[in-house]
Structure formats: structure tokens, C-alpha cells
Image: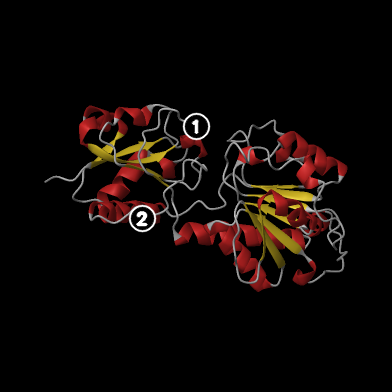
Amino acid sequence: MSKGALALLIHGGTDNWSPERWKARFDEVCRERRVLPLAEAKRAAGEVHYAAVWKPAPGELAGFANLKAIFNLGAGVDALMADKTLPDVPLVRVAVDDLTGRMAEYVVLHVLMHHRQELYLRESQREKRWAPKSQWPAGAISVGIMGLGVLGANAAEVLARIGFGVAGWSRSARTIQGVECFHGEAGFEAFLRRTDILVCLLPLTPGTRHVLNRQVFSKLHRDSPMGAPVLINAGRGGLQNEADLLSCLDDGTLGAASLDVFAEEPLPKESPFWTHPKVVLTPHNAADTDPDEISNYVARQIERFEAGDPLENVVDRGRGY
């Protein structure tokens, strides 16, 4: 009996996200299965049992009546969840070691950048000014991570090993060795009050949209060697109230920010974030994981599923992640 086909619904703006490159990858790891680009998949819709997707247009998945699972090729599923026509089948998010490791690299890089006064030192270099400031130890800085899923928990553990005081906040209770864990609304303010560098890795849901706002920023710890607190957002652009963020940078409520995500992407050229002296900006590449690793992950999941094993990392649609 032939195996169900895998449809590719991929809309990307770079060469690496071209449907042709993803078809070549999936042809390699799904050699006994038809891998169909969107146009072909529509013509053979009844044969399609699986879909690998990246930014599919609303309604595109609704035409596959025999769909058994959807695999999102990135970590965030908020755009998919907003599609009211999304078929009622398991939605699987990417959770591979490569992605987890790359996110930890990004978080550690930017925590260290602010901790080691890199903005000041690079300004000094441009001005040819030899004027080092006193440098405090990692243990003098408290890092708080919002979101203790796989990515957040791993980043917290790495930062704790370096010597930072690390706390985490999540919706439900978590336990991570070496990390002070807070949860729920009851623990949120206490978490903020002890945080010098706030790292946000939350998923974007109706409950987390614009959670990074002036009210939150004003509750961060202000009596550290760094002076004003710092924000690092590598989650989703919709998490940050960008008007609040800019005004808090301007008035000193925040001392600096590292931003990988924005409400509108690509970031418009007229955005003040591009040139703000307190902003370190990256183009949503904090954890741009290895495509070969992702295609292998999806292929393994399908084989396990067809062998009768449960799918892993299935999104809880009630929670949105």
C-alpha cells in the first residue's frame, strides 16, 4: 500500500526557504513517499496525509480532507492558530536539539553583551577613547527568563552555569536545578522585581500579546551595577508593545534592548529601531535552525506515527503552544 503524500506549503522570502530547496530535502529523507509542492498537492488533495508548512496562507490547508498531521517548520505557531479554517488534526511544532542550542547561543551572547558593557565599549572604539569602566562579576546580575519551555529552560541552565543569578517565569509551576522558578500571576511581580536582564521566549497567544509593556518594564530591578534594566526579546514580535518599548528606552526606564523580532517583518526602513542607540537589532535569526535537521525530524515523526507511536511536541490548541 502506498504511503500518504506529504504536501509542502512553504512561503519564504529567502533562498533557504524556497519550496524547491525544501522539496529536495524531503525527497532525500522521504524516499518512499510522494513529496508534493502546493500546486501538485492541490491536484492530488485526496492523497495528502501530511503537510509541512511555513507561513501558509489562511485557508490553504482546508482543502486536504484526508490530512492526518500538520508539521510547522518553525517554532512559533501563532500565525497558524489564527487561521479559522485550520483542519482539526494534530499540529506539531519543531523541537530539535539544533534549534535549542542556537537559541541558547543567542540568549547567552546578548546577556553577555549587555553584562560586559559592549555598547559602551564599541562606542568608545568608534570615538578612539581608551576609557574602560569597572566590570562587575556575572553573579552581580540577575537574569529573568519569561517562558520555561524547552528553549527557555535550556537557556536558563546555561546562564546559571556561567554564574548569573537566574530566575524563570512560566504559566504553570516548573522546577529547574539552579534556577529560581516563579509561575502564574501570583509570581509574576516578584519575578520582575528581581530581574536586571529580562529575556522573553514566550509563545504569542491572545494572553501574551503586548505583555512586554511599560507596566512590566517599570517593575524590573533598578539597583544593579548595570543601572537601568535590559530587555532581550527572541520570542515573537507581537509580545512587545513597541510604542511603550521605545518610550521606555528614551526615558531611561530601560537601559537597552536586544530585539530579534518585531510586529512587522521585515522591519520597515523607517522604523526608529534601526538607528536607536540603545537597541541591538537582529533579523529574526536567533534560532534559524538547520533545515536538514528539521526535515529529518519531520520524516522521523511521520514514520513513528505510521508505526502506531504518538506524535511528539503536539500543540495544545487551547493554550496556543
Nearest to viewer (mark 2 / mark 1):
1
> How far from the left and from the top, in percent, is residue 32?
18, 50
Mark nearer the N terminus (2 vs 1): 1
Residue furthest front as drawn: 186
* x then y, percent, for residue 198: 72, 54
- Distance (Cα) linking label 2 and label 1: 25 Å
- For image coordinates 75% across by 63% down, the residue present is 142
290 left or right of 236 in image:
left
In this picture, is 198 found above or below 45? below
- Helix, strand or loop status at disc 2: helix
Q: Which mark is residue 297?
A: 2
Helix, strand or loop at label 1? It is loop
Label at residue 156: none
Position in image of residue 12 (x %, y %): 45, 37
Q: In the image, what residue type sits under mark 2?
A: Tyr
Amino acid type at mark 1: Ala
Asked if 301 appears above or below 134 in the picture, the reply is above
195 vs 176, left or right, is: right
What's the residue at 82%, 46% (across, down)?
218
The residue depicted at 81 percent of the width and 37 percent of the height is 247
Side of 122 relative to 148 (left or right): right
